[in-house]
Amino acid sequence: MESGPAVFAGTTFLLFGAGLLAWTAVRALRGAPVADGVSPRVAVPSALLAGAVCLALGVWCLTRI
């Protein structure tokens, strides 16, 4: 019973993290702002860090099955 929520949470974290990393990469390569009203020098590393943390959490959740 407990593996169902772990799979759901892991999959959600993985999808969100991958999407955030892809979106950030596309926005940064095009020179578009990543976050409205925030300097790109702050927004890009913050978004990349958040995406990497989400991927790590997703992997961690899926290893707990």
Image (cartoon, rainbow, N blue to C red):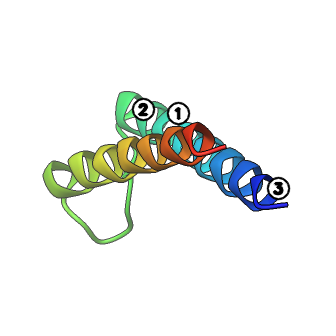
Which tag, 1 or 3, sits closer to the chain's start?
A: 3
Whole-number angstrom distance, CA of label 2 to CA of label 1: 5 Å
| SS at badge 2 | helix
Residue at image mark 2: 25
Classify mark 2: residues with Cα within 10 Å, few (<14), some (14-19) or many (20+).
some
Q: Nearer the viewer, residue 38 or 24?
A: 24
Give neighbour class at mark 3: few <14, some 14-19, many 20+ (Cα, 10 Å).
Answer: few
**Mark 1 neighbour class, 10 Å CA radius: few under 14, some 14 to 19, many 20 or more:** some
Tag nearer the camera, 2 or 3:
3
Q: Residue at x 49, y 44 (%)?
A: 60
The kind of residue tagged 2 is: Ala
Q: Are marks 1 and 3 in contact (CB under 8 Å)?
A: no
Which of the image's four quarters has the N terminus? bottom right
Q: Amino acid at mark 1?
A: Ala
Q: What mark, if any, has residue 5 been given in the picture? A: none
- Callout 1: SS: helix
The tally of labels here is 3
Q: Is residue 16 above or below residue 56?
A: below
Confirm or deny contact between disc 2 and disc 1 (CB under 8 A).
yes
Percent position of residue 55, x then y:
48, 41
- Residue highlighted by disc 3: 4
Q: From the top left corner, tell me how far across and down residue 9 is, in percent.
A: 67, 57
What residue is rendered at 18% in x and 60% in y?
Answer: 39
From this view, report whether residue 38 is shown above or below residue 51: below
Q: Residue tagged by mark 1? A: 22
State whether residue 59 is above or below residue 6: above
As rendered, which of 17 and 32 lies closer to the eye?
17
Of 52 and 5, the residue lying toward us: 5
The x, y position of residue 48, in whole percent, is 33, 43
Q: Residue at x 42, y 41 (%)?
A: 56
